[in-house]
Image (spheres, grey):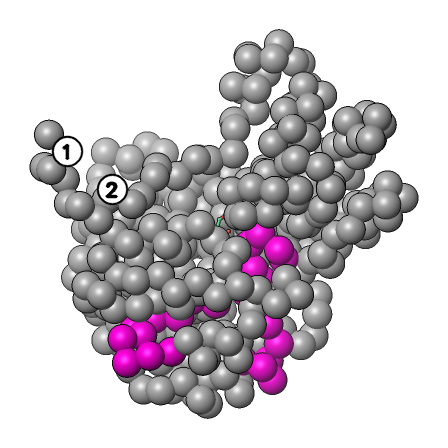
Amino acid sequence: MNDICRPELDALKPYKPGKPISEVQRELKLKKVVKLASNESPYPPFPPAIAAVERILRGLNRYPDANCTALKERLASFLDVPEPNIMIGNGSNELVRLIANAVLNPDEEVIFAKPSFIVYPTVTKMMRGICREIPLKDFRHDLPAMLKAVTKKTKMIIICNPNNPTGTIVFEDEVSEFLEKIREGVVVVFDEAYSEYVEDERYPNGIDYFRQGKLVAVLRTFSKIYSLAGFRIGYGVAPDFLVEAVSKIREPFNVNALAQAAALASLDCQDEVSRRKRLNAQGKRYLYGEFERLGLEYVPTEANFIWVNVERDSQEIFKKLLAHGAIIRTGDIFGYDTYLRVTIGTQRENEEFIAALKEVLKNR
Ligand SMILES: Cc1ncc(COP(=O)(O)O)c(C=O)c1O
């Protein structure tokens, strides 16, 4: 029966999410587990978001606003971009897929970094596109090499900024030069899921390139600093034609009513966003210090996770950390067998993770 499904699906595997806390507790009979595996925020949603959700619960017999009108209006003023250039998705992940669905013809090429977010190859292959994966240089996107990889068949380039799993960024001057040289007809997607965490002043705002009239789409999410991962809601800014194309192929009610209300209320909590950015920065400095004490090399991060080399098989370390109640992501899925990707948690979670790591590495 395998020939019933489209053959391009043969090259794909189902997405393997980080292990849920409840599963680890059950399997290993552990009371306390810290999950630092999925780059989620360790903090609950903002109180006004929870209140907004509670207010509309009794209206859930109705479909949501299919156009996400109130949220788009609010985002238009927040971002200072015209409302018709905003798209809302069931997570920014959905928008990556919808853009690929909208623009890719079979055998057209998509350029992205290796390692980067594992969804990019999936959306490319499902459209029968060709993946052109360009190795990172010093753990950062190698934009000159990505530029060199452009051919007649290139349709899309995805720049994950900051990059998942390394947490590194490309700088404003590098991106400007890159975009100057890109030939017409190539859509450049900036995946800025972690942008709110960035401290480095050389970080470009992808939306500025949209304002300059470049063929770019900028994707952001409420899943990370806004703590709404469970709701699935993200947004994008793109030229009119692309927003229109995406709206033709998305599900009519792709973003649920609760998520829309929570996202809208969260945008009014910018002081708390700044506070969480500071807490994340403190967490990363604490983890840097501990990694240095343990003699582990890490890549300085601009996101809410750290890419660290434990110089041992990451699967083995994963299992041992799990037994101590800490869930992280192994580097092997990104092609780096001795690396871990560790999400920055609360100070207590970070300390618990470090205590577990010290135990696991004791007998090196
Ligand atoms: C780089 C990157 N883009 C997009 C996403 C997906 O975000 P969302 O929850 O908005 O679908 C993630 C999630 O981990 C990510 O790492």
Residue depicted at 70% across the width and 70% down the height: 200
Q: CA distance from mark 1 to mark 2?
A: 9 Å
Residue depicted at 23% across the width and 75% down the height: 241
Q: Is residue 125 left or right of residue 289?
A: left
Q: Is residue 43 left or right of residue 218?
A: right
**Which residue was labeled with disc 1?**
2
In which image quadrant can residue 196 be found? bottom right
**Which residue was labeled with disc 2?**
10
Q: Is residue 347 left or right of residue 168?
A: right
Task: Using the image as rendered, state which of residue 348 and residue 263 is in the foreground.
Answer: 348
Q: Which residues are magenta?
A: 150-175
In which image quadrant can residue 124 be found? bottom left
- Name the amino acid, label 2: Asp
Task: Using the image as rendered, state which of residue 261 and residue 333 is in the foreground.
Answer: 333
- Name the amino acid, label 1: Asn
Q: Is residue 136 above or below residue 33?
A: below
